[in-house]
Image (cartoon, rainbow, N blue to C red):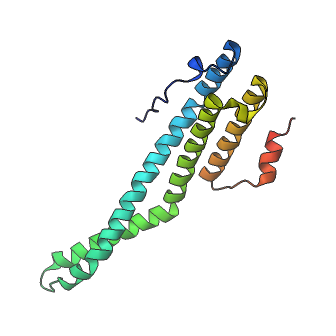
Amino acid sequence: MQSLHDGGDSFDKCLHFSPENKEKLKAHYSRIYGTLLFWKTEATKNGRFHYYCLWWTTISSVLMPFLSQSIDANLPSSKWLLTVISAHVALCLAFHKGLKVAENHRAFRHGESEFYDLYRRLLDQPHKLGETEDEQIKNYFDRVEIIRRFTRNAETDNLPNIEDVKSYNEPA
């Protein structure tokens, strides 16, 4: 099972927030931890399958001309080798395209990266998220929700438009 890398000093040692706000931030992180683990696992799975398909596609495209020249009509196994390799590559490409492996890898990796960029910004430069502690934390929570929404929509192949994001962040 995957685990998240230790990101170094976190909210406990952050000098920018009060003890009460540190607790809010730690509680928020504990709630999103499972999501981050899911994104990392999915990015890893999709990335591995993407590179597996890329490797087989590249190798087979180079080997096929040579293998087709070495077919011996009296040796059925030589035909089978060509057939099995071709079928394997065709299945890889079909699953790669049908499951949108490259797109999912990119979406989960991007979501994970966006979150950690925002997380580091809050820890290192909170003034970029607002004037006051409360404003910074509110903006951080709002932006995390936007990242989660974009990643979830990419996962379900339903890209949001800007109106979806605006209406999501408006007060009820």
Q: Percent from the top left, x then y, of residue 97?
A: 50, 65
Residue 110 drawn at (x, y percent): 57, 48
Q: Is residue 45 left or right of residue 152?
A: left
Residue 89 to residue 3: above or below: below
Question: Where does the N terminus fall, quadrant-wise?
Answer: top left
Is residue 97 left or right of 15 when viewed as pictured? left
In the image as oriented, which residue stretches furthest toward the right?
Answer: 172
Q: Is residue 117 above or below residue 162?
A: above
Task: Give the quadrant of the C terminus.
Answer: top right
Residue at horizontal 71 percent and vertical 36 percent from the top: 128
From this view, report whether residue 80 is shown above or below residue 30.
below
- In percent of width and height, residue 145 lies at 70, 38
Residue at image x 61%, y 21%?
Answer: 26
Residue situated furthest left in the rendering:
74
Q: Which residue occupies the foreground of this view, 75 or 122?
A: 122
The residue sitting at 60% across, 27% down in the picture is 29
| Residue 112 occupies quadrant | top right
Question: Quadrant location of residue 131?
Answer: top right
| Count of number-bearing discs | 0
Expressed as whole percent of the image width and height from the top left, the position of residue 95 reads 45, 62
Residue most toward the top? Answer: 19
In this rendering, would 98 be left or right of 160?
Answer: left
Image height of 17 relative to 36, above or below? above
Q: Nearer the viewer, residue 97 or 54?
A: 54
Front position in the image: 166 or 123: 123
